[in-house]
Amino acid sequence: MKIRLLKNYSTYRLGTVVDCEDETALRLIRDGLAEREQQMDLIETASVEHDYERADATPRRTKRAVSKPQNPDAASG
């Protein structure tokens, strides 16, 4: 049962909504320390979180082509 505390109780502060066992809740209400939480009729809505893709991957280096001399005799000197 959900109750709202009217006074500080244990480690809970005034105004805190606590979900506790029915027996404990009824005792706290009887002793004037709490009141039953009034639940309002709330409309529950659904929302969708879109998945976004990001390009976080570091681009891989490509191997450079080794330039070949145009004249094969130029390298031998």
Image (cartoon, rainbow, N blue to C red):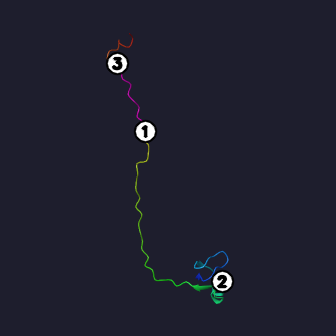
In the rendered view, would you say 24 is above or below 45? Answer: below
Which numbered disc flags the more N-terminal residue, 1 or 3? 1
- The dot on residue 69 is 3
Q: Which amino acid does label 3 sit on?
A: Pro
From the top left corner, tell me how far across and down residue 22 is, in percent.
63, 84
Secondary structure, mark 3, is loop
Q: Nearer the viewer, residue 17 or 72?
A: 17
Q: Where is residue 11 shown, x and y percent of the image?
A: 66, 74
For disc 2, the marked residue is 24
Q: Residue at (43%, 47%) from the top-left corner?
A: 56
For marks 2 and 3 on the same chain, the one whose residue lies earlier in the sequence: 2
The residue that appears at 38% across and 25% down in the rendered structure is 66
Dot 1 amino acid type: Arg
**Most common SS among magenta residues:** loop
Q: Please identify the quadrant where the C terminus is shown.
A: top left
Residue identifier under label 1: 60
Residue 63 is covered by the magenta coloring: yes
Q: What element carries label 2?
A: helix
Mark 2–mark 3 Cα distance, whole angstroms, equals: 91 Å
Q: Is residue 32 left or right of residue 61?
A: right
Chain part drawn in magenta: 59-68
Alpha carbon distance from label 1 to label 3: 28 Å
Q: Quadrant of residue 73?
A: top left
Q: Do the residues labelled 2 and 3 touch (CB within 8 Å)?
A: no
- Dot 1 or dot 2, earlier in sequence: 2
Residue 33 in the image: x percent, y percent? Answer: 63, 85
Q: How far apart are marks 1 and 2 (CA)?
A: 63 Å
